[in-house]
Image (cartoon, grey):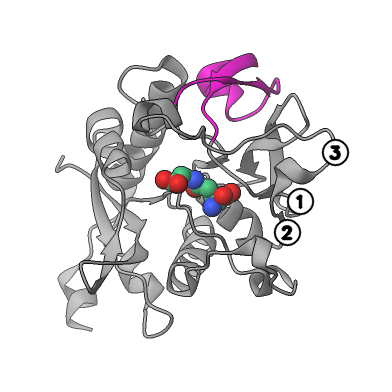
Amino acid sequence: MTKPIVAVPADIRSFDGATWHAVQHQYVRAALNASGVMAFIIPAFEEGYDIDAILDRVDGVLVSGSASNVHPARYGKEATDADGPFDPARDATSLPLIRRAIDRAIPLLAICRGIQELNVALGGTLASEIQDQPGIWDHRKPADVDRDGMYAIRQNVMVREGTCIAGIVGSGEIKVNSLHRQAIAETAPRLAVEAVAEDGTVEAVSVIDARAFAVGVQWHPEYWAETDKPSNQLFTAFGDAVRDYAAAKLPVTAAKVVA
Ligand SMILES: N[C@@H](CCC(=O)NCCCC(=O)O)C(=O)O
């Protein structure tokens, strides 16, 4: 079987005087080296996309983290300074891609900003600057450290028994990294909370009654996907789901291509 392909929606970034469609290396590296799948970066556009035309050509969707945040208008709220920075093109690409992948039973792994997009895509809301709320831990990336330090495994999360994630990494306490200022506020009706932090912050969800792998995590399993056991288990499970989907997918017949 040829190596399956997963779509990874890009961020819009500006540097060197130009606008770029970008995904951080750690995500596409984890896809290739831990999931055994190829990541195709999907440029971010606010309009003009045929989402089904993209999904016809891939075997999974991997939604990466990002320093930008989903625009509050996407979940019925007014934007404040605390909610930025924004990336409307990423929102406009990611959200329909997530919804349609779930509809079409295409495997989905959503990470950090990705779990927040998954929640918004299915009707949930987000909270900003969660560390300012009473009793909430500071989940932001550590300052004044190198990149490995930013992504250090340092936070306990409790994986609930009988969940999709528990079937992959086991139930009970696992240690993860944490680099976020936002979190799920109202959980979308179709999402099951699968893991929480000690302060109650939602750390993992799965799509209820999903016909394929459909998981979101607030932490970053991609960064240590080749060396950290729970991270590797998650990416291996995603890769297995993608391979199962690819193997079962009927080939695009010549008749369909002609039409
Ligand atoms: N912006 C959201 C999601 C956070 C996230 O995806 N973090 C990844 C780290 C990106 C970086 O700063 O390199 C939030 O803050 O909750």
Where residue 128 sits, quadrant-wise, is bottom right
Q: Nearer the viewer, residue 149 or 174?
A: 149
Q: Earlier in the sequence, mark 1 or mark 2?
A: 2
Look at 46% across and 64% down and name the residue there: 94
On screen, residue 80 above or below 22: below
On screen, residue 152 above or below 60: above
Q: Position of residue 232 (x, y in %)?
A: 38, 23
Nearest to viewer (mark 1 / mark 3):
3
Q: Which residues are magenta?
A: 152-178
Q: Nearer the viewer, residue 170 or 180?
A: 180
Where residue 166 sits, quadrant-wise, is top right
**Left or right: where does residue 204 sit relative to residue 239?**
right
Q: Nearer the viewer, residue 239 or 203?
A: 203
**Left or right: where does residue 192 sit relative to residue 29?**
right
Dot 1 and dot 3 residues touching (CB under 8 Å):
no
Where residue 251 sits, quadrant-wise, is bottom left
Q: Earlier in the sequence, mark 1 or mark 3?
A: 3
The residue labelled by disc 2 is 125
Identified by mark 2, the residue type is: Thr
**Quick one: which residue is furthest to the front in this view?**
144
- Quadrant of the image containing the N terminus: top left
Q: Position of residue 181 (x, y in %)?
A: 62, 47
Q: Earlier in the sequence, mark 2 or mark 3?
A: 2
Q: Position of residue 101 (x, y in %)?
A: 47, 58
The residue labelled by disc 1 is 185
**Left or right: where does residue 229 sit relative to residue 3?**
right
The residue labelled by disc 3 is 134
